[in-house]
Image (cartoon, rainbow, N blue to C red):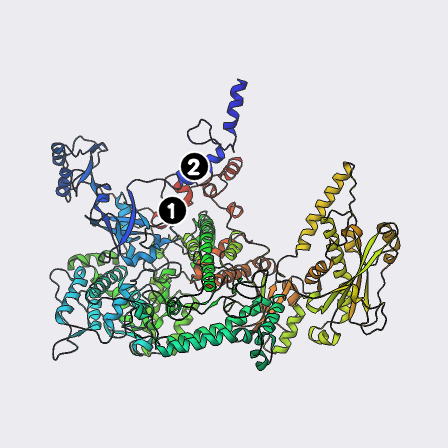
């Protein structure tokens, strides 16, 4: 028994790792529960599924945008159990007869009792017999069901199509199937590439075949690809035509494109065959040119397509006024603006702005007026139209599209030659404020000396980079303007490359410039190429070379080749991009998982509140206005467009909605209208009349929205409000607001998590100085998101404050205020320092004495500018610098293993004008150094950061050595560092009994120029401790005056022109004392926890929303504020600052939700010990037990009235 119990102990161990697969060694309980391979994540939250397929994807422009092409081999292997009825019995009988190998066929038949009868391919008689029995019921009883036929996947079926990683809602959409007999890959339309973030370089995607009617209905109505036209992240379009279609659209709609009758009719029919029907009559517009032969323009063809797709009667009142992406300097001023009036395209070329994934364009307008299916049909129709047009008007590009003419090439050469010669000198002239003549005449050695001086200063390299980038960006702009578009040998639209970049089809002006002009400035993490320890960026450049090429400015171009150093710089930038992409993918993925798991139960309820799965309220109205982000773009930003299209908007979504129902007779249409108008009473609704009516919501709009409406109605810039009447305009906007409201059941928590997580993959840099972000170092990108969301950090890495100056403060007073806040270090004022070796002293214990001299400028140089006297400097040196120097040297000695310590004996003020040789340092024995600064001042001081650890380690080592009887001596210097420098005679004798010069501290005040400190080192440290280096390091970190926790200040200008001071560091209490300079009511900081502690939870919520928006704004990524408000309200709902990590997950309402995140065993044992109950309300809990999540269509039940 003992041996048996001993053998079973490892099986009960919670963390036993287990052996390799196939062995008898079992894994522990913890390993079976946790991680991706654990019970929760692999077998309960996610499972391997049947009725699915996966293959390589390929494009097909002739498919509808909502279709997916499925290979025949897949269609034969995927089945759907279709119930047999009188309506489909004949069809299913033929499928059963065909069997599993003939398409379309069937795999099996399920009888009334649930028994599955497999159809054999080699038994045709069995299949015929089963087909005849389909409508015959065998047996009797209430439990019998209708027979089901497991038929093949057919064209017209609906499937779910998915690409991983599924970062947002549009990563899985429903498509209708078109079976492709001769294909081997899954195919779909180009318009869906943006939604799936897919390309066709070998990507694979997944098909899932829904297996019941409810799932199929939801797929056709809720998940259909056409309905995912806009993204919930920002409300902007996701789908659109790309590349060749954009080029073709521009070529077709440009002013000089004409079509014959044959071409016009062929293109029209081929593009619109899906909307024409059998008996539809199409009336051609009047030709634009009648003689010598009839010709139609491309704009007329597009106008006809718009009318055919928009309405069966072709009575389209659609209006649009929008900007084209194609510039006016290549197509003319008139063609750069698109104008559609009553469905007719009157002017403008159609490019990416109109039918690509761009907001407020042609397709986006169609989607808003006529709905998702009409917009999808328009995209499909335009796709076929542009594809067919390209068949007869091919597009190509070649080397001749990239060549510049002689004048442009010469101008380019002269501009770049001037930049190579003078850019560095101009930058140094600007930084050091030199005379222009002297700056341009600067030789290489002088320039290198200036650069070396900058390299030794704090932020010197950053200043040089900023100056050089400013000058070189002007050079690049000058080169571009000299070469494009007039400098090309071939002009638009005959230049294929310019046609692609100018219309948005592919590439940009940057690509054209790099091929034909220059590659430009190489940037690594937002900075120019850094120098190595030798001062050179590459061995082929001289140390501290200030030229543009040495800093990574590549004047070469791909057309004629680049030089080896430029190639190396270019590879550096490419490598950085690859590494950054690899790193950010994992980090952003984990960030999104943390957000989704925490917010999965947050949804919009029927009372319009936002609640978690335990019914705790996060928001009383979603996003402060109740608007769905995916429906908000037109409503909140384009009131003029809505007034322009008021007739169509009201006709489609208002009174005329029932006239647009397709395929119904007049009697059926009236019946539907009557049924709906009765409030669905026949359905047995459980809602009372008051709650079912939305009349109470009419007019209940957000103040911001109503202010915009009133302002537009008052200004009436286009005269549209006066034309339709202000009252009618306001009613229209109220109706539009109500139609744009978010639907109850929306999983707004998951949408918010996806709205943050999906765009975070586009962030490239961690820290960077963006335009508008100020000069202070700020953490950006994914590290900042992790700091704000995952850790909810109490001490942000780069805290800053924005201090708005009062309007009465002029720039001079603003500079004075900054000097009051700015940290002033010893090295900032130190002119030079010297270290004098005074030789050996002592009789018993021999030491080596040094005198450290600190030379400062005359007080008149800085006293008024910095509001600082020499007496204050002397006091700071005595109380801070000397103590820090003693500590640093002591630590340096300890690292050598020497047991003796050192002491700072005295600080003296020396008159540099005195004639006494005793008061002056002996130059023959003195090492003098120019004072430099530490470029990494923002980083913790290595001397200070290691003091505690080194001290504790040395103390413990010394005590252990004493216990072993070894000869180790331990000195505690902390007490000495906290005391005044004045050392008593007794204490000094204890430490240095035979050092007569170190008996007391004497300060001689002769004149305010020179301060001297005396240092004694044990003889064993002589020559091994570099006193000069230690003094330099301490001077870089020792502070003369500072505002606590504020290091630097910068003067910035806000968008409205007002001035503000940006600080590195945050200290709200300290800046409150400066109300004479700043508006203390508008002070802002990025330290969320500090705001929470100082101003309260509502201020912290608002600040968190602002900081999150600033992170995305820095990268130009639009994220709707409603998502950010959900995030902020969740984090601050409990009155604190809750993080999205396992500690924050501890407050989640569901135990299973917590277990499915991380540390499953911990949450499981805690729940068991506390007897917690999970009411299975959260999505994770319901999925884990096989139930439908209570959100969306799962948050209610459909009850049918059963009549006897």
Which residue is at the far front?
540
Residue 208 lies in quadrant: top left
Which x, y percent locates residue 981? 81, 59
Q: Residues within 10 Å of mark 2 (few under 14, many from 20)?
A: some
Q: Find numbered disc 1 in the image and state the secondary structure of the residue it sits on.
A: loop
Of the pair 385 and 701, the residue shown nearer to us: 385
In the drawing, does residue 219 fall left or right of residue 1180? left
* Numbered label attached to residue 531: none
Which residue is at the far bottom?
437
In the drawing, does residue 385 fall left or right of residue 993? left
Q: Earlier in the sequence, mark 2 or mark 1?
A: 2
Q: Residues within 10 Å of mark 1 (few under 14, many from 20)?
A: some
Of the pair 288 and 716, the residue shown nearer to us: 288
Which x, y percent locates residue 661? 21, 59
Asked whether residue 804 is in view, the answer is no
Residue 1069 lies in quadrant: bottom right
Q: Is residue 840 above or below residue 707?
A: above
Of the pair 923 and 173, the residue shown nearer to us: 923
Which x, y percent locates residue 83? 20, 40
Asked whether residue 532 is in view, the answer is yes
In this rendering, the label closer to the viewer, 2 or 1 = 2
Q: Is residue 1170 above or below residue 1007?
A: above
Q: CA distance from mark 2 to mark 1?
A: 23 Å
Which x, y percent locates residue 1147? 51, 46
* Numbered label attached to residue 39: 2
Q: Mark 1 and mark 2 in contact (Cβ < 8 Å)?
A: no
Which residue is at the far top?
1
Q: Find numbered disc 2 in the image and state the secondary structure of the residue it sits on.
A: helix
* Numbered label attached to residue 1190: 1
Q: Residue at x 15, y 68 (%)?
A: 263
Of the pair 965 and 226, the residue shown nearer to us: 965
Q: Residue at x 85, y 63 (%)?
A: 1002
């Amino acid at each position: 028994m003992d041996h048996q119990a001993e053998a079973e102990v490892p099986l009960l161990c919670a963390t036993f790792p287990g052996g390799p697969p196939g062995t008898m060694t079992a894994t522990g309980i913890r390993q079976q529960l946790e991680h991706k391979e654990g019970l929760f994540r692999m077998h309960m939250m996610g499972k391997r599924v049947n009725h699915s397929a996966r293959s390589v994807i390929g494009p097909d422009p002739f498919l509808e945008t909502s279709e997916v092409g499925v290979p025949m081999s897949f269609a034969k292997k995927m089945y759907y159990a279709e119930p047999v009825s009188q309506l489909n019995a004949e069809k299913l009988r033929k499928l059963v007869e065909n069997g599993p190998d003939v398409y379309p066929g069937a795999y099996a038949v399920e009888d009334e009792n649930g028994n599955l009868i497999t159809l054999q391919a080699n038994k045709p008689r069995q299949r015929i017999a089963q087909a005849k029995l389909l409508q015959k019921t065998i047996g009797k009883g209430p439990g019998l069901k209708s027979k089901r036929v497991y038929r093949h996947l057919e064209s017209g079926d609906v499937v779910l199509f998915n690409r991983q990683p599924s970062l947002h809602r549009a990563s899985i959409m429903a498509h209708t199937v078109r079976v492709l007999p001769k294909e081997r890959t899954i195919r779909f339309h180009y318009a869906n590439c943006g939604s799936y973030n897919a390309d066709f370089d070998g990507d694979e995607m997944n098909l899932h075949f829904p297996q019941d009617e409810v799932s199929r209905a939801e797929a056709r109505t809720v998940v259909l690809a056409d309905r995912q036209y806009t993204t919930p992240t920002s409300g902007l379009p996701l789908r659109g035509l790309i590349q060749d279609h954009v080029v073709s659209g521009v070529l077709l709609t440009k002013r000089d494109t004409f079509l014959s009758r044959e071409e016009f009719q062929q293109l029209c029919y081929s593009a619109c065959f899906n909307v024409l029907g059998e008996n539809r009559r199409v009336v051609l517009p009047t030709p634009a040119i009648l003689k010598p032969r009839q010709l139609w323009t491309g704009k007329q063809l597009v106008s006809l397509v718009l009318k055919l797709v928009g309405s069966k009667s072709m009575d389209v009142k659609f209006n649009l006024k929008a900007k084209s992406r194609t510039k006016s300097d290549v197509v003319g001023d008139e063609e750069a603006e698109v104008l559609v009036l009553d469905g007719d395209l009157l002017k403008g070329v159609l490019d990416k702005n109109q039918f690509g994934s761009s907001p407020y364009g042609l397709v986006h307008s169609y989607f808003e007026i006529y709905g998702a299916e009409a917009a999808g049909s328009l995209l499909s129709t335009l796709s076929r139209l542009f594809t067919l047009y390209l068949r007869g008007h091919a597009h190509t590009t070649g080397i001749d599209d990239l060549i510049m003419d002689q004048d442009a090439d010469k101008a380019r050469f002269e501009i770049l030659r001037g930049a190579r010669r003078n850019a560095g000198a101009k930058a140094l002239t600007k930084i050091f404020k030199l005379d222009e003549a002297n700056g341009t005449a600067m030789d290489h050695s002088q320039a290198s000396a200036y650069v070396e001086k900058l390299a030794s200063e704090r932020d010197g390299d950053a200043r040089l980079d900023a100056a050089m980038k400013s000058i070189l960006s002007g050079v690049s702009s000058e080169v571009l303007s000299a070469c494009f578009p007039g400098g090309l040998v071939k002009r638009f639209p005959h230049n294929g490359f310019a046609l692609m970049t100018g219309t948005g089809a592919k590439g940009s002006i940057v690509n054209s410039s790099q091929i034909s002009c220059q590659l430009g400035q190489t940037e690594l993490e937002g900075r120019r190429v850094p120098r190595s320890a030798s001062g050179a960026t590459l061995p082929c450049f001289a140390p501290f070379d200030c030229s543009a090429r040495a800093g990574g400015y590549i004047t070469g171009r791909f057309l004629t080749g680049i030089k080896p150093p430029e190639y190396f710089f270019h590879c550096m930038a490419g490598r950085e991009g690859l590494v950054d992409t690899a790193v950010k993918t994992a980090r952003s993925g984990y960030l999104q998982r943390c957000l989704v798991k925490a917010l999965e139960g947050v949804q919009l309820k029927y009372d319009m509140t936002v609640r978690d799965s335990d019914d705790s309220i996060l928001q009383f109205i979603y996003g402060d206005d109740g608007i769905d982000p995916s429906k908000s773009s037109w409503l909140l930003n384009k009131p003029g467009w809505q007034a322009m299209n008021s007739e169509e908007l009201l006709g489609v979504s208002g009174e005329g909605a029932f006239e647009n129902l397709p395929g119904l007779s007049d009697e059926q249409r009236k019946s539907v209208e009557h049924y709906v108008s009765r409030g669905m009473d026949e359905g047995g609704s459980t809602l009372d009349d008051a709650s079912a009516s939305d009349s109470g919501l009419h007019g209940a709009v957000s103040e911001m929205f109503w202010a915009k409406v009133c302002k537009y109605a008052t200004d009436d810039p286009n005269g549209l409000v006066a034309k339709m009447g202000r009252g009618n305009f306001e009613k229209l906007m109220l109706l539009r607001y109500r139609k744009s409201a978010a639907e109850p059941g929306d999983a707004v928590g998951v949408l918010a998590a996806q709205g943050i997580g999906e765009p975070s993959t586009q962030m490239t840099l961690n820290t960077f100085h963006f335009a508008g972000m100020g000069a202070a170092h700020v953490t950006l990108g994914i590290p900042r998101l992790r700091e704000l969301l995952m850790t909810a950090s109490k001490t942000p890495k780069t805290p800053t404050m924005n201090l708005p100056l009062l309007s009465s403060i002029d720039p001079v007073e603003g500079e004075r205020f900054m000097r009051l806040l700015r940290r002033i270090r010893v090295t900032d004022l130190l002119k030079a320092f010297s270290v004098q070796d005074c030789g050996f002293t002592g009789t018993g214990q021999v030491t080596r004495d040094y005198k450290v001299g600190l030379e400062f400028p005359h007080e008149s140089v800085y006293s008024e500018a910095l509001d600082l006297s020499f007496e204050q400097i002397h006091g700071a040196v005595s109380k801070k610098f000397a103590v820090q120097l003693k500590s640093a040297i002591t630590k340096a000695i300890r690292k050598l293993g020497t047991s003796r310590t050192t002491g700072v004996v005295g600080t003296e003020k020396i008159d540099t004008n005195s004639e006494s040789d005793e008061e002056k340092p002996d130059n023959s024995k003195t090492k003098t150094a120019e004072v430099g600064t530490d470029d990494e001042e923002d980083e913790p001081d290595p001397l200070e950061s290691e003091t505690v650890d080194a001290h504790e380690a040395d103390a413990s080592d010394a005590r252990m050595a004493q216990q072993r009887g070894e000869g180790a001596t331990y000195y505690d210097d902390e007490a000495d560092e906290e005391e005044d420098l004045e050392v008593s005679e007794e204490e000094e004798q204890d430490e240095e009994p035979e050092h007569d010069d170190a008996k007391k501290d004497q300060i001689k005040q002769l004149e305010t120029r020179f301060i001297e400190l005396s240092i004694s080192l044990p003889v064993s440290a002589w020559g091994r401790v570099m006193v000069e280096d230690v003094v330099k390091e301490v001077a870089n970190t020792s502070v003369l005056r500072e505002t606590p926790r504020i290091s630097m200040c910068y003067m910035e200008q806000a968008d409205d022109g007002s001035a503000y001071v940006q600080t590195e560091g945050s200290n709200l209490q300290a800046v409150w004392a400066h109300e004479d300079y700043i508006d203390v009511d508008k002070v802002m900081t990025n330290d969320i926890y500090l705001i929470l502690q100082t101003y309260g939870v509502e201020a912290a919520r608002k600040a968190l929303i602002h900081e999150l928006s600033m992170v995305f704004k820095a990268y130009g990524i639009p994220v709707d504020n409603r998502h950010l408000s959900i995030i902020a309200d969740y984090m601050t709902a409990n009155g604190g600052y809750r993080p999205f990590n396992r500690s924050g997950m501890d407050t989640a309402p569901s135990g299973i939700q917590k277990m499915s995140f991380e540390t499953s065993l911990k949450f499981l044992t805690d729940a068991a010990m506390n007897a917690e109950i999970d009411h299975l309300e959260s999505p994770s809990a319901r999925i884990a037990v096989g139930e439908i999540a209570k959100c969306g269509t799962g948050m209610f039940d459909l009850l049918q009235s059963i009549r006897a």
